[in-house]
Image: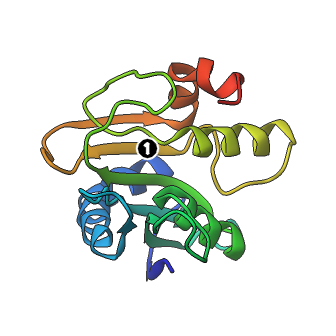
Amino acid sequence: MPNQHTTSGSSDTELLWHRHVPTLIDRAFAARDRAVSHRKIPFKVGVAALVQDPRDGRTAIIDGANYKPLPGSDGPRKCGEEDVEEEADRLGLYIIGMVIAAPHQPDDATGIDLGVTPSCTFCRCRWHTKHQAGRKYCVTPGTHLLFINADIPTIKVAMTVQRTMAIFNGATSQGK
């Protein structure tokens, strides 16, 4: 279950994003402690998102982690981004940006290697499907993403959801 922490904020989302990145990085790494991974060498992902309430402009930080128990185990399996997105969507909040801390792994569908683990195919397909359906969703094309290699934290890649979709378009458009 994601943790939530309320903060005060302004309507300038770019300024808010850049001001909160250091805290988001700390929260994403801390969230990795709650991750569950069935792999022999655990693949723990922590995510921290800066969210904003469209009703009053207030901001908060929500963090979450991946939950991938042994195959066949009871309960939902989800990635870290999905954990955070479910909470933000349930509360009617928009995600200004997410910091994703994970061990390095090339993209699961295309094999593109940016030195970090990008959001998985399922996340990209979820974003694509929600936007194609015209559904209001917590993640927008302008949502910031900061991917951090958890083993070598100096390796970081920043982009928006729109840019992520463009880079990995082949995997998303084919629905892999």
Quadrant of the image occupied by residue 145: top left
Q: Residue furthest front?
A: 72
Place of residue 51 in the rendered image (x, y in percent of width and height, measured from the top left): 53, 64
Q: Compared with residue 21, is residue 87 higher up or lower down, i.e. above or below?
A: below
Quadrant of the image occupied by residue 174: top right
Q: In front here: 37 or 35?
A: 37
Q: Amino acid at mark 1?
A: Leu
Q: Is residue 12 visible?
A: no
Q: Residue at x 37, y 52 (%)?
A: 100
Q: Compared with residue 113, is residue 48 higher up or lower down, i.e. above or below?
A: below
Place of residue 115 in the rendered image (x, y in percent of width and height, measured from the top left): 25, 30
Q: Residue at x 48, y 77 (%)?
A: 2
Q: In front here: 73 or 45?
A: 73
Q: Is the image coloured rainbow, by chain, by secondary structure, or in one colour? A: rainbow
Q: Which residue is mark 1?
A: 145
Total marks in image: 1
- SS at badge 1: strand
Q: In front here: 126 or 12?
A: 126
Quadrant of the image occupied by residue 95: bottom right
Place of residue 133 in the rendered image (x, y in percent of width and height, measured from the top left): 87, 42
Q: In front here: 97 or 102?
A: 102
Q: Residue at x 65, y 28 (%)?
A: 172
Left-right relation of 146 to 90: left
Q: Residues within 10 Å of mark 1 (few under 14, many from 20)?
A: many
Q: Is residue 59 visible?
A: yes
Q: Residue at x 70, y 74 (%)?
A: 90
